[in-house]
Image: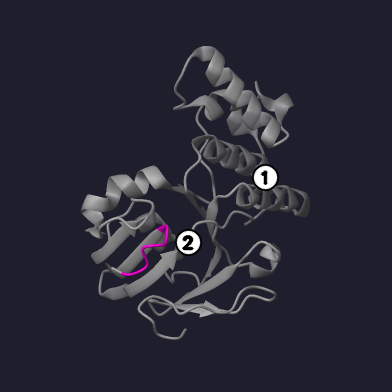
Amino acid sequence: MSGRGNLLCVRGLRKRHGHRELLRGLDFDLSAHDCVLLTGENGAGKSTLLRILAGLERPDGGAFSLAGAHALPWRRARKALGRTILYLHQQPWMFDGSVAYNLGYGLRGSRRSRRARINEALAWIEMEAFADTPARTLSGGERQRIALARAWLRQPAVMLLDEPTANLDRDARQRTLALLHRLHQEGMTLVIASHDPDHFGGLIRRHLHLDDGRLGEQPVPGGPPVRLVGGGEPA
């Protein structure tokens, strides 16, 4: 497999839903510090693609290589994908309990160190006053910020965001976008699936469009030149 300088290389990714070929042998790479916009019509397969990359949904074929390692089928690469890549649903799940409990779920270390990390995350999203608030009473925008803070605590190499600004009012959308800018500035690779590409101006470095099971690369205003997608075919 080529692209040893890439963080993730995918070759020949296929997925069917019933008789429909949803993903038709996709080839693509993600580099460290990429920020990629993924667009496509409803039902094009954007969420399916993200879930496969995060190790959450099985494809019908394809090979995956992380950080130049030997290419593996999804079944054997799944654990490594799950350790490296984090998927955020457009409607973040909140556990019963407080915001602090939701942030601390799964954290390791002493009680003191966990509390310190939770406080750092609350400060990072400017929600220090919400520590004891029941998480399920939060607004959609507040839940999105909590989900981003949980991801920030885990520090994955790649974050996949499924419609992160959908159904948010202007203020909540701006707060979410500001956090995405901070994540990217801190070195995280982002892939953002969205129907609203205009919201992400100044953040996006690449734009991939999924149509009829294939990916094409679109130009980004002020961005780098359009790359070749996958196996070397012009998009």
Task: Give the residue type that dot 1 points to.
Answer: Gly
Query: In the rendered image, which quarter is residue 131 located in?
Result: top right
CA–CA distance between discs 1 and 2? 29 Å
Give how far across and how far down residue 207 sits, in percent.
56, 72
Identify the residue at horizontal 65%, vertical 55% (top origin): 167
Q: Can residue 97 be seen? A: no
- Decide if residue 62 is in sight here: yes
To which residue does mark 2 refer? 31
Q: Determine whether, in the image, residue 160 is placed left or right of residue 54.
A: right
- Relative to the observer, which residue lies in front, 98 or 61? 61
Principal secondary structure, stretch drawn in magenta: loop
Please tell me whether residue 59 is drawn above or below residue 133 in the rendered image.
below
Q: Going by the picture, which residue comes out furthest to the right? A: 171
In this picture the colour scheme is one colour
Residue 208 image point, x, y percent? 51, 72
Residue 221, image x, y percentages: 68, 76
Quadrant in which residue 102 is drawn: top right
Report the residue at 47% width, 26% height from top: 107
**In this view, 185 is above or below 108:** below
Q: Position of residue 68 (x, y in %)?
A: 34, 58
Q: Is residue 89 above or below residue 120?
A: below
Highlighted magenta segment, given as a residue range:
2-7
Mark seen at residue 141: 1
Numbered disc total: 2
Name the kind of residue labelled 2 in the image. Ser
Q: Secondary structure at mark 2?
A: loop
